[in-house]
Amino acid sequence: MSKSIRVKGNASVANVSCGFDCIGYAISNPGDIITLTKKGTPGINISMSGLGSDSISCDPENNTGSKAIISLLEALKSDQGFNLHIEKGIPPGSGIGSSSASAAAAVFGANELLDNPLSLDELLIHGMAGEEVASGGIHADNIAPALFGGIILVRSYDPLDILNLPVPENLFSTAVLPEMTINTKDARQILPKDVPLSSAVEQAGNLAGFTLGLHKSDFDLLGRSMVDHFAEPHRAKLIPGYNKVRQSALDAGAIGCGISGSGPSVFALSDSLEKAEQIGNAMVNSFQNSGLNSKAYCSPIHRKPPEILD
Ligand code: HSE
């Protein structure tokens, strides 16, 4: 049985406009790489490197990767100890599932080293325990796509009901990361606890339209449905130039565009890789006009679980 493993966890786009806390998809890049090694004594020792790693706690109870492993070990009643190294390719506070990528890779790697006692589905709840450290609340729309790949619908949190949505063949993602951070806990705290009935009705209609659009590969319907009445009206002001960046994506041919997770990243969907790249350039230029450097990541929807590198 192997003693050590390296695993890449992928970034993800959550909310996808109309799916606040309930829709997310995985992207191929960027990602976090964890190296996990069994040790002879209980407990988890953490080391970190890479983007923004100096702002992340190495206390096992306050690190998303180790917290996910601790939750797994408690469920298995195991006192196996690990050395965990996390190489951050996704800066924390970027809005593309930085904490989920680490948690998904860590819990996936630990399960592998323990000879796979749990299925991928059973790992989700432990990944969510890790994610909670960073977001201060329970939401699975980053961790579920990071673990399973594809486009995921969280139909219910209690009981947990996670569903795969169809991924149209020619659907591509652009995610643009400006050089600033937004703390997910803070971005959740500014949201009102209640929404008006009229907003709930609009959001329900858009969410249904979005899922039907995926089923029918109807990109006009997808675009019409990508409107967020819950989070975007409150969070847009946190991202300098957001409305202009969104408009630049739509002008460059995006199907739809919105805030990725709790921001500051902004995502767009399109029907070809070439268009995804053109949209990325337009969004980067628009951020520049607001005084922010940014970087675009363009890819198809990533359909696979975390990848074992060696
Ligand atoms: N659904 C979560 C939120 C995602 O919007 O707060 C956080 O990345």
Image (spheres, helix red, strand yellow):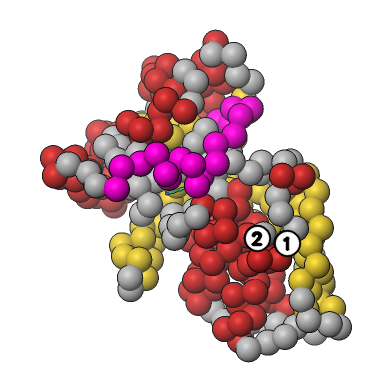
Q: What stretch is highlighted in magenta?
A: 167-193
Marks 1 and 2 close (CB-CB < 8 Å): yes
Whether residue 264 is visible, yes or no, is yes
The residue labelled by disc 2 is 62
Task: Please name the amino acid that badge 2 sits on.
Answer: Asn
Local crowd size for mark 2, using a 10 Å CA cut-off: few (<14), some (14–19), many (≥20): some
- Taking the magenta stretch, the answer to whether it contains residue 184 is yes
Quadrant of the rendered image containing residue 180: top right
User: How many marks overall?
Assistant: 2
Q: Give the SS element for disc 2.
A: helix
The residue labelled by disc 1 is 59
Which residue is found at the position 35% from the left and 41% from the top?
Answer: 191
- The percent position of residue 270, horizontal first and vertical second, equals 42, 33
Task: Please name the amino acid that badge 1 sits on.
Answer: Asp
Q: Measured along the vertical axis of the image, is residue 150 above or below residue 43?
A: above
- The percent position of residue 199, horizontal first and vertical second, equals 19, 40
Which residue is found at the position 40% from the left and 28% from the top?
Answer: 236
Q: Rounded to the nearest whole Å, what is the CA distance between mark 1 and mark 2? A: 5 Å
Q: Horizontally, is 154 left or right of 70 in the view?
A: left
